[in-house]
Image (cartoon, rainbow, N blue to C red):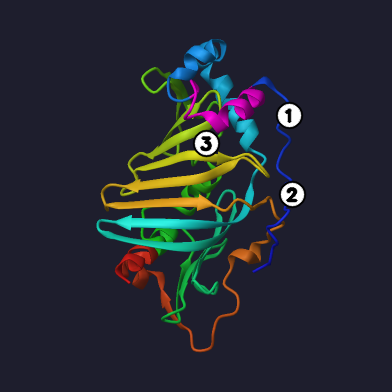
Amino acid sequence: MQSYRLAGARTTAGNRGASAALWLTVVCLPFLLATGCARGGWVETHPELAEQARLQPSSVVEQAAEQTAGLRRLYGSYRLEARRGAGSRSVDLVVMAEFPDLLSIELLAPTGQTEAFLKSGAAEVALWIGEENRLYRGAAGEGAFAAALGLDLSVRDAVSTLLGRLPGWTGVGSDHVEWDEQEQRIRVQTGAGTLGWLHPVTLRFDRMQFLGRGAVTEVLWPEWAEEPGIVPRVIEIDVPAEGIELNLRLASTWLANPPLVATDFDVSVLPVGTAELSLDVLAAEGGLLRRGFEQ
């Protein structure tokens, strides 16, 4: 895996310009919870924007798509807080993601060493667990990433969630877009079976639901970073059917659009004596997430 310095990183994400929508975002975003921008209060403070959202919601969604389209790759550290019933676990992660479907997640021990990794590349999905020196691997394809992770979540779902997008979201005619009066948001439903609510002031999605996707039910994006790119700083995933709650917080310094290559998402050198098993065995054991709660 390539090594990157996070300190002082600069972005190559797209220029967001000096539009009125961006001005509203910069002014309002840091104070969403403290001012009339939160929930329905923004309708009174921004009546012209509210009117546009009601009458021309697709035009607002297209603006949001333009602002987020520039970020296609991400390299950063996350703090993961995972809870299931009375059990909980905290772990540091190093994540590389490339839209739409390349992902590498390293789990770090308190010493900073890699204790496990999950990689989903162009050809295969693999999970290595250091304590057992086991590598589970199988061909990339439908259900492979979900089997490795232990949730009914495709790698495209995971990458989109990290980047703050709805899986399958195009920002154009293929999405069903309408004003949601109760939520005071623009409701976007994609052909990929995801439902999201877009805030017209921030041009960010507040939350997303997976429709008919098994266990994964809702994703919340309560906090966003603006530099070096537009990306969720906090991601909350609620899995009611499994009693699982995940909270991911991105470190303050991260890289936008780093020069990743395809081999960054492949398994490279492994310790001597690594035992190799199929992903079918891992799926029977419950995947990475469930194994983590059991340890």
Q: Amino acid at mark 3?
A: Trp
Main SS type for the magenta part?
helix
Q: Which is closer to the viewer, label 2 or label 3?
A: 2
Is disc 2 placed on a helix, strand or loop? loop
**The N terminus: image quadrant:** bottom right
Q: Which residues are magenta?
A: 21-37
Q: Residue beneath label 3, please?
A: 169
Counting other residues with Cα less than 10 Å from the Cα at mark 1, is it few (<14), some (14-19), or many (20 or more)?
A: few
Q: Amino acid at mark 2?
A: Arg
Q: Amino acid at mark 1?
A: Gly
Of callouts 1 and 2, which one flags the residue occurring earlier in the amino acid sequence?
2
**Residue 127: percent from left, percent from top:** 46, 70
Is disc 1 placed on a helix, strand or loop? loop
Give the CA distance from mark 2 to mark 3: 27 Å
Of callouts 2 and 3, which one flags the residue occurring earlier in the amino acid sequence?
2
- Residue 131 painted magenta: no
**The C terminus: image quadrant:** bottom left
Counting other residues with Cα less than 10 Å from the Cα at mark 2, is it few (<14), some (14-19), or many (20 or more)?
A: some
Q: Residue beneath label 2, please?
A: 10
- The answer to whether 152 is drawn above or below residue 274 in the figure is above
Comparing 112 with 215, the one in front is 112
Residue 56, quarter of picture: top right
Comparing 71 with 144, the one in front is 71
**Residue 136: percent from left, percent from top:** 44, 73
Q: Residue beneath label 1, please?
A: 17
Is disc 3 placed on a helix, strand or loop? loop
**Residue 287: percent from left, percent from top:** 36, 65
Give the CA distance from mark 1 to mark 3: 22 Å
